[in-house]
Image (cartoon, rainbow, N blue to C red):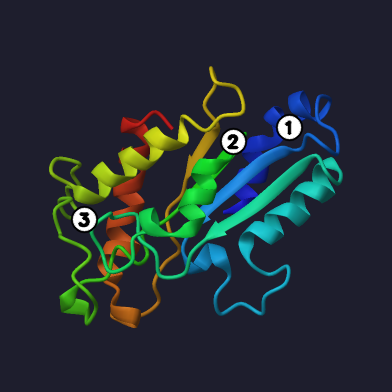
Amino acid sequence: VFGMIVDNLDEYSHDEKRKSSNANSISIACVGDSITAGSHSSGGDHPYPQQLQILLDQAYGNDTYSVTNLGSSGSTMLKRSDKTYWNQTVFQTLRDNHWDIVVVMLGTNDAKDTSSGGPDNWQHDCGDVINPSLKNCSFAQDYASMISIIRTLGKKSTESPQIYITVPISLLKQGVYGMNQTVINSLYPKLIPIIARENNV
C-alpha cells in the first residue's frame, strides 16, 4: 500500500515540498481498521502509517509529510454493522481536521457474514465475483458517502484532499474472524476499483 502511495505522490511532493515547513507539513490521514491501527503488529513503527511516515521522511526529508494513523480495530465502512467506523472517535478526528491527502482502507470487517461464522455485516448485495455491481450495493453507497465527506476536508475550502481508496489485503483462510474469503480476495479487487471510478478518485 505505502509503496504505491509514495510512488504516486512523487510529482505532487516535489511541487508541495518547496512550500512546506516544519509547521506546515503535507498532512496525510490513514483511515482504516486493525490493519491500519496496527493490531497484532509489534507496535512502535510497524503499522503501515508509521512505515509510510518513515518512507516519506527518507524520500523527501523530515517534516515534509505528517502521517496520522486513524485506524480503528474491527471497524467497517458499512454504517449498518457490528462496529461501524462512522461511530468511532477516529472518524470524528478525521472530520475535525483538514487534510492534504486521505488514504482509506476499509472492507475487511465488512466481509464478515453468518455463513463464515461472523456477524451479519456483508449483505451480498454487490453482485458477485463475475459481475460486481454498485446497484443496491450498501457497501458502495456508504463508501460514496465517506468519499463525499472527505472531499469537504481539504485545507483550502475550494480544494478536496487527494483521496486514495485501497483494496484490503488478502484473507489467507476462509472464516477467520468470521470473514468471507471470497468477498475479500475475489470480489473487492474488482468492486473497489469500480467504486473509485464512479466517485472520481
Residues at badges 1 and 3 in contact (C-beta under 8 Å)? no
Q: Secondary structure at mark 2?
A: loop
Q: For mark 1, what is the residue?
A: 13
Q: Position of residue 192 (x, y in %)?
A: 34, 46
Give the amino acid type for the residue marked by disc 3 in the picture.
Answer: Val
CA neighbours of label 2 inside 10 A, class few (<14), some (14 to 19), many (20+): many
> Taking 142 as reference, is 42 left or right?
right
- What amino acid does circle 2 point to? His
Q: CA distance from mark 2 to mark 3?
A: 36 Å
Evaluate whether residue 157 shows in this view.
yes
Which residue carries the number 2 mark?
98
9 vs 177, nearest the viewer: 177
Residue 170: x and y, percent?
A: 42, 67
Q: Position of residue 159 (x, y in %)?
A: 54, 21
* Nearest to N terminus: mark 1 or mark 2: 1
Which three-letter amino acid code belongs to the residue tagged 1? Ser
The quadrant of the picture occupied by the N terminus is bottom right
Specify the label residue 118 is tagged with.
none
170 and 22: which is toward the camera: 22
